Every structure is written in structure tokens, then in C-alpha cells.
Image (cartoon, helix red, strand yellow):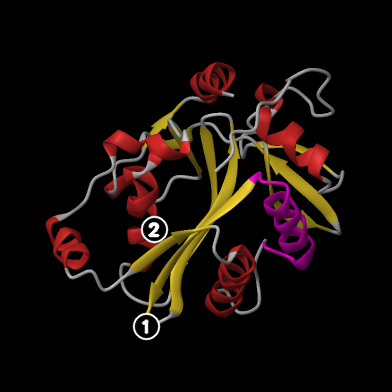
Amino acid sequence: MNQQIINKTNSIFPDPNSADENGLVAIGGNLETGTLLDAYSNGIFPWSVVDGKICWFSPDPRLILLPENIVISQSMKKVLKKNQFKITIDASFKTVIAECRNIRLNEYDGGTWILLEFQNAYTKLHQNGIAHSVEVWMNDEIVGGLYGVQLGKVFFGESMFSYKSNASKAALIFLCENSLEYGIELMDCQQTTSHLLSMGAHEISRKQFLKLLNELI
């Protein structure tokens, strides 16, 4: 993974601290590469589309995971010891983001924030060395994975999926265990979930998060 260094000047976005109680910062704009880089470097990410307009968020609190704090349960350690999974980086980004979209379409009866325009935009980021995927394979088929954006030493996790039990966990653990090789010191998990909390993630304030971004991007 290449570290992308961003010059954080003249942002087109409002101050993320101006977000409402739901973390909404702005509505509108586009998903061009420059717009997305501007957003992420300022702690903002696109999360939904309402009436055809993109909604940009910077929640408070923010869930983060320090790679060295990853928690691997005893049951998960047993799974990993079986070596049933093969794990790769950036081997099939298009497949991973497509499966993240598909699994949510199935789970939420046709609803997902990963619209085709998002899929295309992040694929372009990947082609520019900015977005990355982790693939989990079993019997030569991708059964789980995750994707996100890396700027500097920060990996902004976007979505994950799993068709086999523990596959997405294996992807996250792999990324954490190899974080030094990929130059990652902080993983942005965006929204709080019990699943990520159980794996070592914790909440910090938006103010703390933005300070870390300034230090690590």
C-alpha cells in the first residue's frame, strides 16, 4: 500500500465541528477523487444519498482501532490456526466492493449506501493507489474481505463482508497484524458497532480524532 500525503488547505467542506447531532456536515457535491481526498483528510466521509444528493458525515464520537490493540478471541485463534483462509491485499478490489454492496442489498431488502456511483468512485481511488482491499479466500473463492482508503498512516475502513463465518474478522486481523508493513498506525472505523468494540476498537471525540489526523496524514 502506498502512503498518500495530503496537503490540507482550502477545503471545500465546512468545518467538521459544525456537524449536527447526527454528524451530518454537508449535503451535495460529487464523488470525484479530489473531493473524496479533501473529505477524508478533514475527517469527513460520504455515507448516504438523499433525494439524489450525497450526505457527508463526521460523527462524534468516532470509533477507531489502533492496530496493536486488536483483540483476537480464543475461538478466533483456533480458527486461524486451521489455516483454512488465504488472505491477500489488493488482489481483487472490484470483487470486494461489489460483494460489500451485494450483501447489504440482501440484508436490507434492496437498501445500501454503496450505490453504483460509490462503487465506481472507490474503484477509481483504488486505481490511483488510494483505496485498498483485503480478500479472504477459501478453495480459490473469495468468501470475505474489506476495503477502505489510506491517507498517510491512517486507514479509513469503509465496509466489510463475510460469506463464511469469521472471514471478515480474519481480514481485519490480517490488516492489523501487518500494519507496520503497510504504514498504518490508526484505523478509522467511523461508526460504533458492538462487533468492532469486541475486537479492540474504542470511541474518541471528534476533536481528538481530527488532532490525530493532523499528526498522521
C-alpha span from label 1 to label 2:
16 Å
- Residue 126, compared with residue 203, is above or below; it is below
Residue 18 sits in quarter: top right
Whether residue 86 is visible: yes
Residue 192 sits in quarter: top left
Name the residue located 55 percent from the left edge and 58 percent from the top edge. 90
Name the residue located 60 percent from the left edge and 71 percent from the top edge. 95
Q: Quadrant of the N terminus?
A: top right
Q: Quadrant of the C terminus?
A: top right
Percent of width and height locating residue 205: 48, 25
Name the residue located 42 percent from the left edge and 81 percent from the top edge. 140
Amino acid at the residue labelled 1: Asn
The residue at which mark 1 appears reads as 139
Was residue 154 drawn as part of the magenta stretch in this picture? no
Percent of width and height locating residue 210: 57, 22
**Label 1: how many Cα within 10 Å (few below 14, some 14–19, many 20+):** few
The residue at which mark 2 appears reads as 171
Amino acid at the residue labelled 2: Ala
Residue bounds of the magenta highlight: 114-130
**Label 2: how many Cα within 10 Å (few below 14, some 14–19, many 20+):** many
- Residue 147, compared with residue 78, is above or below; it is above
Residue 39 sits in quarter: top right
> Which secondary structure lies at badge 2?
helix
Name the residue located 56 percent from the left edge and 67 percent from the top edge. 96
* Depth order, front residue of 172/114: 172
* Dominant secondary structure (helix, strand or loop) of the stretch shown in magenta: helix
Q: Relative to residue 105, is residue 70 drawn left or right?
A: left
Tell me the mark number nearer the camera, choosing from 1 and 2: 1
> Which secondary structure lies at badge 1?
loop
